[in-house]
Amino acid sequence: MRLELILTRLQKELRAHVVMLINRSGHQIACVGPARDLDLTALASLAAANLAATDGLARLVGEPGFSVLHHQGNHHSIHVSALGERFSLVLVFYEPVAVGIVRWKLRRAAASLEELFRDFSSRKNAAGPGNGSDEPTVPFFTDEEIERLLGR
């Protein structure tokens, strides 16, 4: 429920057609917006592949990575933003959009999502057996845990 609220707020604030949370493998975690005319499976897969290719380009020029991709056409735009090492946000716009505004609004949404993942991970770790180390775990969720995150 909290996850969808964060994504819905972002979608409304930016007037995005679609806001999607995907994992870095290209699987859709959550999506808000009227996406009837989009192949969301293909969008998630291609966005993840695009980020992976961009990571390769970043390494070639000596950067640890590029966290944002923005493709702007005459009438449609796609914005892909890395969210930690496991997730990404994909936004689709059907009207011109200022990249600076998108990045500014995304920072707040990303902070809220990262807090949500930390909270969920902490509860998960407190409820289950420890991993034998003192290092914090990187959020990795099963399908059932994602359903609980979504409040279903």
Image (tube, helix red, strand yellow):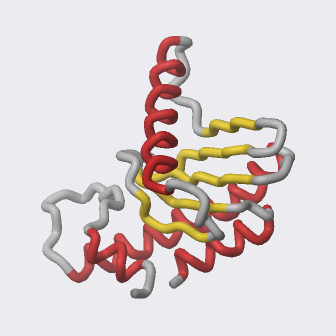
Q: Residue at x 28, y 70 (%)?
A: 143
Q: How many marks?
A: 0
Q: Position of residue 124 (x, y in %)?
A: 28, 76
Q: Quadrant of residue 8?
A: bottom right
Q: Nearer the viewer, residue 45 or 142?
A: 45
Q: Is residue 130 left or right of residue 92?
A: left
Q: Position of residue 98 (x, y in %)?
A: 86, 46
Q: Quadrant of residue 67?
A: top right
Q: Quadrant of residue 5?
A: bottom right
If the image is split into quadrants, where does the C terminus sit?
bottom left
Q: Is residue 102 left or right of residue 110?
A: right
Q: Is residue 37 left or right of residue 84?
A: right
Q: Nearer the viewer, residue 39 or 131?
A: 39
Q: Is residue 50 above or below residue 22?
A: above
Q: Position of residue 53 (x, y in %)?
A: 47, 26
Q: Residue furthest front?
A: 37
Q: Is residue 55 above or below residue 12?
A: above
Q: Is residue 58 above or below residue 150?
A: above
Q: Nearer the viewer, residue 54 or 122?
A: 54
Q: Residue at x 74, y 53 (%)?
A: 93
